[in-house]
Image (tube, rainbow, N blue to C red):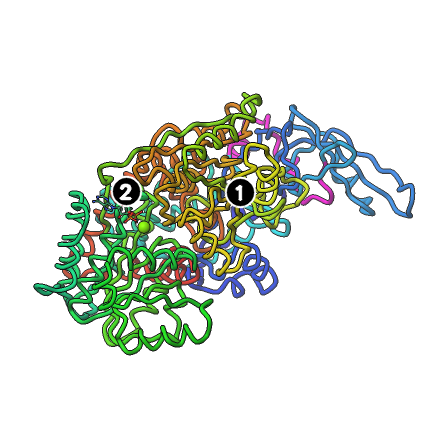
Amino acid sequence: MTEGTGATSGSESAPGSFTLDSRLSGALGGRTAQAFERGFGHRTVGDLLAHYPRRYAMRGELTALASLPLDENITIIAEVIEVGERSMRARRGSIVEAKITDGTGVLTLTFFNQRWRAAELRPGRRGIFAGKVSDYKGQRQLAHPDYELFDDAAPIEAGDAAARRWAEAPIPIYPATGTLASWQIAKAVALVLDGLAALDDPLPTSVRQAKSLLAHREALELVHRPERDADWKGARRTLRFTEAFVLQTALLERRAELRTHTTAARHPVPGGALERFDAALPFTLTGDQRDVGAEIAGDLGEAVPMNRLVQGEVGSGKTVVALRAMLAVADSGGQSALLAPTEVLAGQHLRSIVKMLGPDLAAELIPTLLTGQLPLAERKKAMLRAAAGQSRIVVGTHALLGDTVSFADLGLVVVDEQHRFGVEQREALRLKGRNPPHVLVLTATPIPRTVAMTVFGDLDVSTIRELPAGRAGITSQVVPLAIRPSWRPRIWERLAEELALGRQAFVVCPAIEAKVVEDDGAGDTVARGAADDAAPRGDGPADSAAPVASVAAVLAELRAHPRFAETRIAPLHGRMSAEEKDATMRAFSAGELDVLVATTVIEVGVDVPNASAMVVVDADRFGVSQLHQLRGRVGRGGVPGLCLLVTSAVPGSLALQRVEAVAATLDGFELAQADLELRQEGDVLGATQSGGRSSLKLLRVARDGDLIAEARELAQGVLAEAGGLAGHPALAAAVRRRLDEETSGYLSKG
Ligand code: ADP
Ligand code: MG
């Protein structure tokens, strides 16, 4: 590169003064620091140093120009082949146009009124170019790109060692933005590295030696300023392990910290609500339900707040397990709150709880719905019942955690679907009432072990694998319209056949109206991350998004279809008011409607045994686990379910593979694993994993499972030492930084 990139700085001998916690503004100056904060959320030297290169390029390497993505910020290495200047036709001024190539394609660079560029961009010069790819009359171009030309004075051909080193040194390519190009980031990083004070290792020496890893300082140096490929490879290995180790230490620490709080132990009483409920249960619990129930009872019986996650397929009977826990708490004189992700689901939970309890227990325990959209008088009544302790089971949304709602003796909080319930919410809970409540989190999203370890490492995890016997099963079929367009009319025929048997059905669409993609939060993060690959983003350029099936369009199509002249069809989506949604769901449950054309609002918890068929239109727009959950809505009663996954995804595409994976198995755990493997970037934690300040950097849960498990074990060992974390101040500092990050997002998922 040209002078002053700082690749070899002379100031190395002077001891620096920056620590990882130093403000970037002090190190880089206010304006540059601001650019980093705006672009990446970096605030400290440590944040910037953890902005690792995305990849490394070689000076000799030419990046493929043949397929440049439109509207994306790219960084490429290429050679100038021609440069010219002309005056603009319509206005005063000049345009410099340079063509660059990598041997596979040609890209045009344009500059307005910057004649001096022509002198600099001489044919034959190579450099690194960055900018946003645009299209001008069918040609790919970069308008006003940033670039840095390689130093002519260091001929690649020369045989001396210095020249060879220069030619061999990998160039870090950083995740960049429109205002911060890759080499500008490299310069800032170099400045910070040069000014860094001595750094203690977050990894205890024993761990570092056992794993043959580099010292932290050296790893940072080599990941940002490698001289050869082996340098950054070794550095990444060290930093990746360090990341896993610090994260696991943080999670284990937090788990230990949670266990220092005390609360009231909750025991069922002989002849109490739980015993009577069990006696009246119309079925026998599955083995898994019994085992998980025993684990929960064990937790509740301790004076330490429970923090347990129960994962189990849709229909595996989690609600029963949770209800039994609530009854044990009721027996001890306490109350339980059940939090659902949406108002619709809260309403449905309440109804099914009332039904399961039966009239006597319901009269005794007064299950109560308390949501923000209740009419004021009703809400006041519900709040009184909660505050007075009359209602032993209060069902609602997150509004239940608000300041205005109080409980006489809140003993247990059950959270249905975990994703929007994080550390902060648990913290808010702890402050509610005299004793912190026990917390039980339910999720129907099967989580592979290592993901659970990373995302919920501070929770105990129970798994219900077994489905209650007597399920009729679901047949899933892909309708690949790109391959078999003639199957299209069969879709509605098949639906009509199901309805003719007296059954009900769902038709699920990704959007509400054309261009309005549903994001009412009913989906989970995992699914949303995957759906984002395919779904048009709300903030993206509208014209680049292919039209997706919408509730409005499909509803109109079905209503006009001669086969459905007698069919009662209604829409259900997040734009409807709570009352409308609730009324629609009730009507469907009562058999007054035959078909719901819906978005993912029906995803979680809907239980209508007579609903046997589901058609998912544009199925590739949904994530794997989301499709699996949707499918779980049918085949819940004694009737066999049918799920048609309609897609226009092209053969061989990842989108089609995902849909096929869903059709291939009903085992949610197997699917979760397949999903992990199908995600190239392993973006398991959703969008936050791939960028931003508080996210996983080098760690990929999909790929690094063994490493995560090993790190957890080693972290356990270190925490079990006599001094614990206090004996390792640098590790303690890294853990604190990690936990600080989480408060601003990540695991909490506000
Ligand atoms: P989940 O919450 O895991 O989706 P639910 O608790 O709602 O599952 O259970 C789904 C249905 O299965 C409910 O109608 C419930 O009454 C029924 N069910 C639960 N456990 C059993 C069991 N052991 N045997 C038979 N049916 C069961
Ligand atoms: Mg449920």
Amino acid carrying mark 2 in the image: Arg
Q: Residue at x 25, y 43 (%)?
A: 709
Q: Is residue 438 above or below residue 704?
A: below
Image quadrant where one finds the N terminus: top right
Above or below: residue 453 compared with residue 397: above
Tell me, yes or no, whether the highlighted magenta stretch contains residue 147: yes
Asked which quadrant contains residue 560, the reply is top right
Residue underneath mark 1: 510
Q: Which residues are magenta?
A: 141-168
Residue 340 seen in the figure: yes
Indicate which disc, 2 or 1, sits on the residue closer to the N terminus: 2
Q: Which of the two residues, 243 or 443, is positioned nearer the viewer here?
A: 443
Taking 263 as reference, is 488 left or right?
right
Residue 198 visible from this viewpoint: no
Residue 350 is inside the magenta segment: no
* Residue ID at (48%, 50%): 51
Secondary element under disc 1, as helix, strand or loop, is: loop
Outermost residue on the front side: it is: 566
Q: Position of residue 507 (x, y in %)?
A: 49, 39
Q: Image quadrant for the C terminus? A: bottom left
526 or 165: nearer the viewer = 526
Q: Quadrant of residue 65?
A: top right
Closer to the eye: label 2 or 1: 1
Q: Identify the residue at horizontal 59%, vertical 58% (top origin).
A: 35
CB at disc 1 and ligand 1 closer than 8 Å: no
Query: What is the distance, in whole Å, between disc 2 and disc 1 at their CAs?
Result: 30 Å
Left or right, 275 with respect to 749, comes to left
* Amino acid type of the residue tagged 1 in the rendering: Pro
> According to the image, label 2 marks what residue?
449
Residue positioned 46% across, 50% down in the render: 601
